[in-house]
Amino acid sequence: MSTLFELTGQLECLRHTLESSDGEIPPDLLAWLEGAEGEFAAKVEAYCNVIGELEALATARKAEVDRLKALHSTTAATISRMREALRESMIRTGQTRVETVRHKVWVQTAGGAQPLNIDEMGVPERFTRTVTHTEPDREAIRKALESGESLPFACLAARGQILRIK
């Protein structure tokens, strides 16, 4: 049995020959063409079956990806709640550092830029920027506050406490 590509080439050659002939088809050519058409149809059927199986496999794999994403989200949320509960417990009991056989756990002040509390309704134009809408320019506000300027609409907030586990 010929491959789909071989059959395609043969059928194209035959069609070109038939189109360029005077319209008469020799009986042996007609028999070959009918046989090749049947063989081509069988190849198309097989290709369609493989395509259908691959589509079913892709659908099943997509469902598995969605299932694993949901499991990941659930696990990540559980981790977050457990870390927060442990952090709160350590702060409430005054134990900011605990060493176990396998872990070192401590609570520390968060690093990075100090959080801002901003009353967005009271921000003067000097401290705004326009992207698609006007919004507070947090960097300009932060720089002004850090340099000691008093702004009635904003203040630097206290840094939070984070839990570290090693």
Image: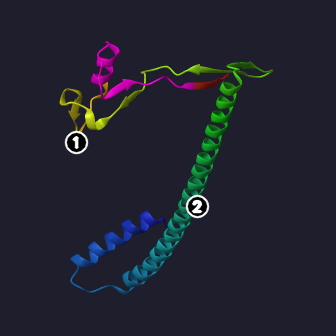
Residue 10 rendering spot, x and y as whole percentages: 38, 69
Residue 132 rendering spot, x and y as whole percentages: 22, 42
Dot 1 amino acid type: His
Residue range corresponding to the magenta coloring? 140-161
Dot 2 amino acid type: Ala
Residue 60 image label? 2
Residue 151 image label? none
Q: Residue at 59% across / 52% down in the picture?
A: 70
Residue 67 rendering spot, x and y as whole percentages: 60, 55
The answer to which of 162 and 158 lies nearer the viewer is 158
How many numbered discs sit on the rendered protein? 2
Horizontal arrangement in the rendering, residue 98 relative to residue 41 (left or right): right
The answer to which of 18 and 146 lies nearer the viewer is 146
Residue holding disc 1: 133
Q: Are marks 2 and 1 in contact (CB under 8 Å)?
A: no
Does the magenta portion include 113? Answer: no
Does the magenta portion include 146? Answer: yes
Single out the residue that lies furthest toward the left: 125
Q: Is residue 100 above or below residue 125?
A: above
Q: Residue at 71% across / 25% down in the picture?
A: 93
Residue count near mark 1 (Cα–Cα under 10 Å), binned few <14, some 14–19, many ≥20 = few
Sequence-wise, the earlier of marks 2 and 1 is 2
